[in-house]
Amino acid sequence: MFNAKRNSQRNAAYATTADFYRIFTEDMDGLYALSLLLTADHETAERCFVSGIDECVGNSQIFKDWAESWARRTIIRNAVRAVTPHPLDGDGTDGVKSGVGLAVRSEIAAVLELRSFERFVFVMSVLEHYSDHECSVLLGCARSDVIAARTRALQQIGSLVALPGQTRTPELKDRSAQPVCRLDDLNVAPLARPA
């Protein structure tokens, strides 16, 4: 009798299939937005989202309290596998694929225009609040690559998004005199992970 009660309590601590279906249903827009920001491609984002559901539902060893963050992490891992961003890739032209047809706010468009590695680092570290160490582990790179990529991403976004009271400029001339980009000015809060 004691073991049955203990097993019941233990099982209640883990997320169930129903818990993950609820998470993916209730936060469908947020999880898909995360997937789209990472992949910059609707088709790949959909595959990452659906794979995330399959992986989460099939995993019975996740604590219930961690289920939402696990769902987001699964989306990120799937996007990393699908896109394979690397700090040394390309010439900076692998952002949004032509024909994606996104009608989005300028700050989101600026994120989608980033090279894949910078986009992943920006989304993971700034929007999802992953540490530099977590980003480097998930992306398979050095922490210094993460720090450099975030700096480049913030500079590019700062040059693409007009700050309140300013006009859009291709480059900031005196970077020491003004911030490259303030996160409050990006208005990306709706896409950030809930606190």
Image (cartoon, grey):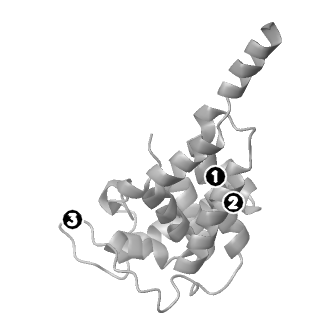
Outermost residue on the left side: it is 165
Report the residue marked by disc 1.
Answer: 73
Report the residue marked by disc 3.
Answer: 164
The image quadrant that residue 13 belongs to is top right
Crowd rating for badge 2 (residues with CA inside 10 Å; few <14, some 14–19, many 20+): some
Residue 99: x and y, percent? 47, 92
- Left or right side of 157 for 41: right
Residue 122: x and y, percent? 53, 62
- Left or right side of 102 for 18: right
Along the polypeptide, which appears first: circle 3 or circle 1? 1
Residue 51: x and y, percent? 67, 64
Outermost residue on the front side: it is 1
**Disc 2 element:** helix
Task: Return the residue nearer the eye: 82 or 63.
Answer: 63
Q: Amino acid at mark 1?
A: Arg
Can you say which quadrant of the picture contains the C terminus?
Answer: top left
Label 2 and label 3: CA atoms lie apart by: 35 Å
Q: Amino acid at mark 2?
A: Arg
Crowd rating for badge 3 (residues with CA inside 10 Å; few <14, some 14–19, many 20+): few
The answer to whether 51 is drawn above or below residue 57 in the figure is below
Q: Are marks 2 and 3 in contact (CB under 8 Å)?
A: no
The mark found on residue 77 in the picture is: 2
The mark found on residue 116 in the picture is: none
**Disc 1 element:** helix
Label 2 and label 1: CA atoms lie apart by: 6 Å
**Disc 3 element:** loop
Residue 74: x and y, percent? 66, 55
Task: Return the residue nearer the eye: 22 or 179.
Answer: 22
Which residue is depicted at the point 68% across and 58% down?
54
Q: Are marks 2 and 1 in contact (CB under 8 Å)?
A: yes
Task: Return the residue nearer the eye: 92 or 50.
Answer: 50
